[in-house]
């Protein structure tokens, strides 16, 4: 009953958004073409997405598919169709399963789209404004309460239904909508008015005021993002001594390509860092993973191998749904030479298990050997909703096998693993919407977490909005103070 009630509520939002977006000058499609694309998408997800029922039953998924299919009608445009199918992709509850607007819709938004001129930051589920939308409206630092009469809570709930995240993790969705993504998602999901009426609350007086603000185009919106500077180019990794006996290792990615672009070799950086840690007699190590969205498989193992002296098993198993797929012609493997190569790789690396599942062979991606002189001092790990994929896997290993203390936000990736690795990019033949379908279900050999959640921090801390304005790192400062007064053994 809860499932139907929830999606009935969501579908009212979908109807509202599709009606609002119907007025845009976009190509419209006959119902027959929309049905064909819809069925291709849902059938392909069920055929290839190995983790599709990790957090949902097949009955629940089919129930949502039926509800959404009933919204199809003649002469919907690409954005309207996107808003009907994106909740289905979101309902896979896997952030590696992404949906993309068709090229013509993307270009329309780039040239003709109208956007609310705001950059925002979520702090404890309150949405704070990072810029003044015009010279005569000074609301930087105010809390955003409503847009065009609809509460920000309702708006975020609506947008969340179109954004995939692992399991039931909300923090990664809040982080995704930071900066100007609230504006871009509002435009593609709710509407594109020429004028917005917003209600804001002054944090100093707790008084609410209404303001009418004019929309901006995409170029102006990008300028707002640059001006705010919420995100900037980050080094892939860095090592620093913070205070006597305390060092920090920051890993903003595990992706080898990003290290190579910065003339860094990941494994050499890690080994050199731990040589310094050993020579300097460091007792407290802070590992900052707040911007780490994962990357190359095995790098998280390599880092972990320096932090434990106990043998461990990383994955219970790695599963794939099939040795071949029926919809290659609509994917980036449409050429026979490409899909044959994919099938050969799958067959080389996987075999049929006794229970009927297709599992990766144990000699593929072997566990990194433990290092002879690991760091067994006090470890503090900083995490956020951006900590994902390989960053989340590393976090799960540290939670399972060490006494590391976690500080910050819930990890954005699922505690028990993810579906990623090999993938097929499906392009729907009529609307041209694209969907990345991940093929490999990685099940970590862990048991100390909650299903559908990320690693929960021992100290759940979010910086205040004032911390952001003053460029103060409250999470790091907390870790430094904690490391200065606590001495906890690392190995269990």
Image: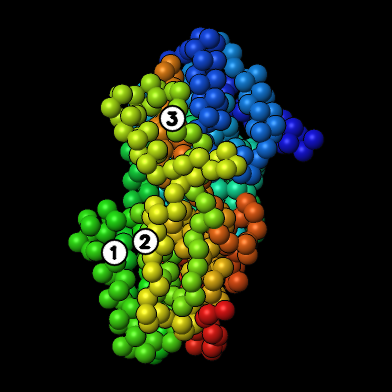
**Circle 2 sits on which residue?**
299
Q: Nearer the viewer, residue 150 or 198?
A: 150
Residue 222 drawn at (x, y percent): 35, 43
**Circle 3 sits on which residue?**
324
**Circle 1 sits on which residue?**
266
Residue occupying the point 56% across, 30% down: 46
Q: Which mark is residue 119?
A: none
Residue 407 drawn at (x, y percent): 54, 71
Element carrying mark 2: helix
Task: Find out whether the residues at labels 1 and 3 contact each other: C-beta distance under 8 Å.
Answer: no
Snapshot colouring: rainbow
User: Which residue of the protein is positioned furthest toward the left in this rendering?
Assistant: 263
Looking at the image, can residue 129 be seen? no
Residue occupying the point 55% across, 59% down: 445
| Inter-mark Cα distance, 1 to 3 | 34 Å
Task: Find out whether the residues at labels 1 and 2 contact each other: C-beta distance under 8 Å.
Answer: yes
């Amino acid at each position: 009953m809860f499932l139907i009630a929830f999606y009935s509520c969501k579908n009212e939002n979908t109807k509202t958004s599709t009606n609002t977006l119907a007025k845009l000058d976009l190509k419209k499609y006959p119902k027959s073409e929309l049905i064909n694309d819809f069925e291709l998408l849902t059938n392909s997800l069920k055929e290839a997405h190995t983790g599709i029922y990790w957090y949902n039953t097949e009955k629940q998924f089919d129930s949502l598919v039926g509800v959404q299919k009933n919204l199809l009608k003649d002469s919907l445009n690409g954005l309207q169709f996107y808003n009907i199918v994106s909740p289905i992709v979101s309902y896979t509850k896997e952030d590696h399963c992404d949906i993309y607007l068709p090229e013509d819709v993307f270009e329309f938004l780039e040239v003709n789209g109208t956007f609310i001129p705001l950059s925002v930051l979520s702090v404890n589920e309150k949405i704070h404004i990072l810029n003044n939308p015009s010279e005569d409206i000074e609301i930087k630092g105010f809390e955003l309460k409503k847009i065009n009469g609809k509460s920000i809570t309702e708006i975020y709930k609506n947008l969340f239904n179109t954004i995939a995240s692992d399991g039931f993790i909300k923090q990664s969705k809040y982080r995704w909508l930071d900066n100007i993504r609230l504006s871009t998602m509002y435009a593609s999901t709710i509407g594109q008015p020429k004028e917005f009426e917003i209600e804001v609350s002054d944090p100093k007086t707790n008084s609410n005021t209404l303001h009418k603000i004019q929309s901006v185009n995409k170029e102006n919106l990008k300028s707002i993002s640059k001006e705010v500077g919420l995100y900037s180019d980050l080094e892939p990794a860095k090592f620093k001594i913070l205070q006597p006996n305390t060092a920090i290792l920051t890993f903003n990615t595990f992706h080898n390509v990003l290290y190579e672009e910065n003339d860094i070799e990941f494994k050499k950086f890690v080994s050199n860092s731990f040589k310094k840690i050993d020579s300097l007699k460091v007792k407290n190590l802070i590992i900052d993973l707040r911007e780490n969205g994962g990357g190359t498989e095995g790098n998280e193992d390599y880092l972990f191998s320096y932090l434990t002296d106990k043998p461990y098993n990383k994955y219970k198993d790695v599963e794939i749904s099939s040795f071949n797929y029926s919809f290659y012609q609509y994917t980036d493997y449409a050429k026979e030479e490409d899909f044959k190569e994919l099938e050969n790789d799958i067959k080389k690396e996987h075999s049929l298990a006794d229970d009927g599942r297709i599992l990766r062979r144990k000699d593929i991606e072997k566990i990194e050997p433990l290092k002879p002189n690991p760091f067994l001092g006090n470890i503090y790990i900083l995490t956020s909703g951006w900590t994902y994929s390989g960053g989340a896997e590393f976090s799960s290993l540290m939670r399972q096998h060490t006494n590391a203390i976690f500080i910050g936000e819930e990890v954005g990736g699922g505690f028990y693993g993810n579906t990623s690795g090999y993938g097929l990019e499906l392009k729907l033949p009529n609307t041209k919407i694209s969907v990345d379908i991940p093929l490999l279900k990685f099940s970590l050999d862990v048991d100390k977490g909650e299903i559908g959640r990320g690693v929960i921090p021992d100290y759940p801390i979010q910086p205040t909005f004032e911390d952001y304005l003053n460029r103060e790192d409250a999470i790091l400062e907390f870790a430094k103070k904690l490391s200065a007064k606590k001495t906890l053994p690392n190995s269990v």
